[in-house]
Amino acid sequence: MADIVFDNVTKRYPDGYEAVKSISLEIADGEFMILVGPSGCGKSTALNMIAGLEDITSGELRIGGEVVNDKAPRDRDIAMVFQSYALYPHMTVRANMAFPLTIVKTPKEEVTRRVEEAAEILDLKQHLDRKPSQLSGGQRQRVAMGRAIVRNPKAFLMDEPLSNLDAKLRVQMRTSVARLQDQLGTTMVYVTHDQTEAMTLGDRVAIMRAGMLQQVGTPMELYNAPNNLFVAGFIGSPSMNFLPATLEGGSVKLPMVEVQLPQATREAIGRLPEGKPLIAGIRPEDFEDAQVVSGDGGATFKTRIDVLEAMGSEFYAHFSIDAPREGLAANEELRELQEDAGGETPGDTFDIVARLDQTSRARAKDEATIWVNTDKIQLFDPESGRNLAAAA
Amino acid sequence: MQHTRKEVTLWSIALTVLLVYCLIPVIWIVSLSLKRPEDIGDGRFFPKSISFKNYDQVFSEGTFTAALRNSIGIALLATIISIVLAAMAAYAITRLEFSGKALILSGALAIAMFPPISIVGSLFDLWRRIGLFDTWLGLIIPYMTFTLPLAIYTLSAFFREIPWDLDKAAQVDRATPWQAFTKVMVPLAAPGVFTAAILVFIFAWNDFLFAIVLTSTDASRTVPAALAFFTGGSQFTDPTGAIAAAAVVVTVPIIIMVLVFQRRIVAGLTAGAVKG
């Protein structure tokens, strides 16, 4: 068990491409840290650098206080679970799990004991004498985990370990991973591109984009106080809605409604030039059917619901708002989020998703009055993408 | 796919013709080896009566048993050394980035295309000067040289198929590069190892050119070369029967070799390593 510290770590490939740009991150002993980001953001490279499978171009990587930049993977005492599982196909499950022990000539009785223990934890006892090719995807995944936990490494590294499983099994294994980490109390670094996994699993989440750390914090910190547009859009499902806005006096002019900013928000963003274009971010749950909302505060507007999805416990209402895209179109972070979601660049129409209460009477293809929680509106600078309320 | 009766018949005929065409010389040699010395010239395809006299004769002659021992020893050693070197070279070539990689590969290919006859003369001279003439090593070295390129190519094709993640997993599981190579890579490339081994063994076993030029006595003369020096039971006897018997004897190890290794060359050994 040990802490892992990135100190200005950079990875530059011979062709000049920088996969990881001067990252500094401290992962505490016993912590469950998630590295999350879209593909190509450098999260796997960062993980491979901890494992020693990638060289570090500059900066320092410390495991348990010891600089490991030039240490071979086998001298770092870390265990890793690969996305492909990387089981040795010519060995039985038992031999696969025993491999990290037998390779350093651990006494036979101890190998047997530890393999049996790990098999017990992972419910693999009846499969010990089978070959990986005879196992299902979920079982192979567990064998890969077993191979990591048979020894007591300083840290576990997980490279998208659940991405090859089907949706249902993934949710199930997610819980087992969390329980396992809790049980073992070993430092774990977990790479994923799935924000749901990131939110549900980690003690802390580090969001990466284009080789740089965007924000590190607990899932709730990231959700409630994102540093920038990218973090705001990446975390949360359905994701945050972004709209162009302008600041006028103490209020913000959105395309569909002008809202009065609460005192707290005004103080947080400080003084800004009048009429400055901004990007407003509103989470789906900060909309509501006006008929359901009681009490005052907030703002309401009328719109036509295009699609209404019944989720049982709530409705997802989709509606569109016409507004010139201008400032938003140029923003690199928004563009990348769009690409990550697989959508094409939209025109001057904004598709908004709102989560409505299950008692809502709203109907598809019909007018509805929607309420916005003005306390929760986040404002971003269109050029830098920075959250104006975030401490600079 | 469903084949019509006509297709099946046509294929059967074609295959039978091919098989007969290939096997007639072999059967002819076997038949010759089983004839009595006095029936050798009778022109019959099947021997009138079967006799093992020819076999008795070749095995009672010191020349042949010595040659057989040389052949087995030299071919096995050449195979082992060549495969060990080729496996290490192929692994390095598939997994490492180093300058001169392309040069090594094209160099290896160039050696394989070199006609042996063009170097055998100078080798004869060189071997005599440095004392390798008429020794096992004197044959093992050229065999190795000529088979290494093919073995490296075959093995690197197999190593390339092995997912890179397995290397990484072995490294993280605390294996030294050597352990990762011997415990993970080589077992997984086993079909390739056996394929390459068969090819090398057959080359060494069948070679006549190097054997006839670089040997002079029973100390290292292999069977193909020794056959050329066969004489009959007496100087007036035609050695045809004995040569036929010896030819049959040297064919047997190759057939056994192929049959044994064929079973080891199983496809899909890497199934289950990674998802899919």
Image (cartoon, coloured by chain):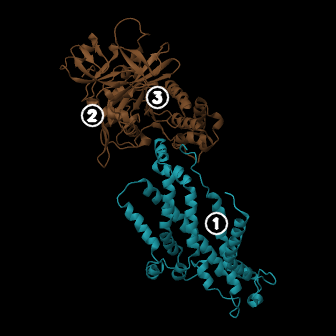
Chain colours: A brown, B cyan
Residue ID at (73%, 83%): B32
Kindly give the residue lying farthest to the right in the view shown: B49
**Image quadrant in which you'd find residue B106:** bottom left
Residue ID at (53%, 49%): B184
Q: Position of residue A181 (x, y in %)?
A: 49, 27
Q: Which tag is nearer the camera, tag 3 or tag 1?
A: 3
Residue B257, label in figure: 1
Q: Position of residue A323 (x, y in %)?
A: 30, 26
Q: Which residue is mark 3?
A: A197
Looking at the picture, which amino acid does disc 3 mark? Glu
Q: Which tag is nearer the camera, tag 2 or tag 1?
A: 2
Quarter of the N terminus of chain B within the rendering = bottom right
Q: Are marks 3 and 2 in contact (CB under 8 Å)?
A: no
Looking at the picture, which amino acid does disc 2 mark? Ala
Quarter of the C terminus of chain B within the rendering = top right
Q: Position of residue A300 (x, y in %)?
A: 35, 13
Tag 3 subunit: A
- The CA distance from mark 3 to mark 2 is 30 Å
Q: Which residue is mark 2?
A: A330
Q: Position of residue A236 (x, y in %)?
A: 41, 24
Mark 3 or mark 2: name the one nearer the start of the chain: 3
Measured along the vertical axis of the image, is residue A88 above or below residue B223? above
